[in-house]
Image: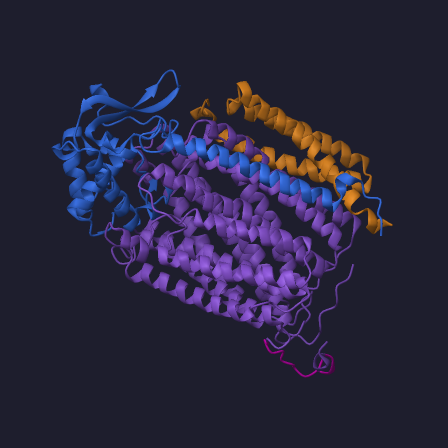
Amino acid sequence: MNENRPVWASESFWKKVAVWVTAGSFVILIFLTFDSISQITAGGSRVAAYTVINKKVTYRFDKTKNRYQPVILDQDEPLFGQMLDEKQAYELVNLGKLTIQAKNCMNCHTLLGNGAYYAPDLTKAWLDQGWGTAASREMLMLQFLQNPGKYARTYGTNRKMPQLGITEKEAKGIIAYLKWMSTIDTNGFPNNFTAIDAEED
Amino acid sequence: MIEPVALADFFMSFFTAALIILTAVVYVALYTWAEVKHKRLVKYASWFVYAALIGCVLLFSRIMHLNGYWQILSVLMALGYWWMPRLILRLCVATHEEDAG
Amino acid sequence: MSSQAINSSVSKVIRPLSMDKLNGGQKLAVHYFTVAMILFMAQLLFGLLAGMQYLMPDFLYNTLDFNVNRMVHINAMIVWMLYGFIGSIYWFLEDESGVEIVGLKWGKIAFWVLTVAVTIVVLVYLLVQTGSGTKSSIWLINEGREYIEAPRWADIGIVAVVLVFFYNVAATFSKGKWSGIAGVLTLDLVALAGLYIAGMFYTTNISVDQYWWWWVIHLWVEATWEVLVGCIMAWSLMTLLGVRRKIVQTWLYIEVALMFGSGILGLGHHYFWIGTPEYWLTIGGFFSALEPIPLVAMVVHSIYDSGVHHFKTRNHPAFAWIIAHAFGNFFGAGVWGFMHTLPQINLYTHGTQWTASHGHLAFFGAYATINIAFFYLAVQKMRGDCWMGGNMPDNGWKWKAAMVLLNLGVVGMTVALLIAGYEQSFIERAVEGSTWGGYFAAQSHPWFIQAMVWRMVFGVMTFIGGILLFWDLLTIGKYEPRPAVGVSQ
């Protein structure tokens, strides 16, 4: 029964290797997860607190980092003209997230580049030049979300967003969500993006 | 941390990446075949394909801007594709030893 | 061996598709396979509808919108593949453990619970579609997170069913004999179920949301599923080709080491752009480059084997699908994966049709093929171990045509989507900087539009292939007088 297999070719050796490699990789992953989560918690170093929706935000090329970077300007720009405290801001953004999930946005759009490819990426939707000017943006977004068939933005493709029955309150939540999401530090994704009011800066 | 691919190199970035995997597999296949069947000519052919693989890795590394510590990746690919089939084949022979006996 | 088959080489015999010779686990497996095939057809059908909407945006607009079709398309895929895997494991559980399945009754109940739940979920997807922005929508209608859209109540049901399945597997192996395969399989199922729970919570923060979401998606598809397939393949190699257990199990462990060694931290290639720290660019890039190693090992081993041994297979369709698996996995995961995996290029390809191209070929090559192969093994046994080698009564045209149509269809879609993805990443992402204007400019480009037409053509081809496959699985071996020749080397 005893074979002339060397140790490094034996079943028991590879069993141990498999266990150690798996366990080792997993332990490293856990360690990195703790570190990553601490950085991407809202209010952490890479993901802004929800009150960021009270501020003017933009996206610019950062020469030292050699990539694009969201910028939170020291200038108030309250959503719908209303400064929100921490709790109110969280509630509005949270309503946006719940609506985005309940309306299944991710199966047409991408968020942070993940989702489906039938409709535009929403990562920087708040900063998109398609809204014309920063002044008209909130109104246009509100109209569009509540009645996407009528205010369709298809750029000649006829690909319209369906009527999803989004209420005004939910639409405001979604807009808050998009504004907050645009401030997440995504390591320079998307590249080469020109924000809506880039010239003003 | 990274220097993205230049616009002009777009196509070549995909092309060389695909070629790396394809030449690697052809090399690995030829190498194994040469070893199992003791074919000298096939062995020379495998070296030729490996040279092509190295060429692809070099081009790929330049296009992808694998500078600084990213160069480790280029070296890993070059050495890895050379040594992996040797190690795996030794494992094959060793694990199947009882069959022959 | 069926004596009836020998005696009647002249008159036409009919072999019934029967469960008589199957053991308990195999009977349950057939249930799983049947639902898997139905869901596979649903996947193809809803893929066609979604693909059609790229060409005709008004098609079913406000009735059955793209998001609904696409959700059913990808959910049906995940679920039919899981049904296939679970079925395959039930299929070999009694043979591998040497005893009857412990608690099979519960396994049967779990099957029906799962199937009823899946039916309700799909009906709600189709009829209710979306809800208001409240937690109850997420609990009852749709979670709105790609691939794991199933509402929370169904999540809990799925976990409960998986626990029953796990109990069947673990208890049966404990009662019978524990093998290397049993050990790997049991631990892998623990990981599979545990990871699903990582996707079962709501959070406002999308970065945190996607961080855990990838744990489910990536660590399922690029780690635990692969090992599951490894276990199924290991058992198949032993029983079908007579490879010795010691060899098979050693290589199963080697494969686990390679897959988990590259796959677990390969998770990093999904953490480039979702808000996670910059070190993931490096980790993801390096470990992605390691992911072809298992493929290299496979190539070396298969050439070594074909040079040293001479295997004969008694099931040509299954064997052909396993070869399709090898090629599909190599191109889909290997070539297509590596082309856009490094952050230097993924910055542009991320979230474009590139991903769709890679996804189609990789899922088909790695998982659909292997399930189809197993369906053929099951059907052979149900036809009383009939001959499934060359010279079938009708020349085996159905399985061959289905094979050609399905493979050509998927490869065609993959290439079409590759062209679309190339154009999209170039124009929308690199030149226009991912604005909405850039997005639609890319969608209106002739390359993109033509690619979508071709995708549709190949999609229809795939669908026809699927129908043929279904028909063939129901009829193959029906008029085959010869019994299968036993395992031989």
Q: Which residues are magenta?
A: C6-18
Does C30 sit above or below residue C137?
A: below
Q: How many marks?
A: 0
- Which residue is outermost to the left? A81
Q: Which one is nearer the viewer's eye here, B32 or C85?
A: C85
Letter of the chain in orange: B
Magenta span contains residue C10:
yes
Magenta span contains residue A75:
no
* Residue at image point 42% right, 42% down: C212
- Percent x, y of residue C299: 68, 43
- Percent x, y of residue B12: 51, 29
Residue A195 shows in the view: yes
Q: Is residue C45 left or right of residue B58?
A: left
- Which color scheme is applied? by chain
* Residue at image point 14% right, 37% down: A139
* Residue at image point 53% right, 61% down: C165
Residue B36, by quadrant, is top right
- Percent x, y of residue B88: 72, 39
Residue C89 shows in the view: no
Quarter of the image for the N terminus of chain C: give it.
bottom right
- Percent x, y of residue C413: 47, 49
- Which residue is outermost to the top? A64
* Residue at image point 56% right, 35% down: B18
Does A55 sit above or below residue C294?
A: above
Quarter of the image for the C terminus of chain C: give it.
bottom right
Residue C349, by quadrant, is top left
**Most common secondary structure along the magenta stretch:** loop
Q: Which one is nearer the viewer's eye here, A89 or C83?
A: A89
Q: Is residue C459 left or right of residue A20?
A: left
Letter of the chain in blue: A
Write down the colour of chain C. purple
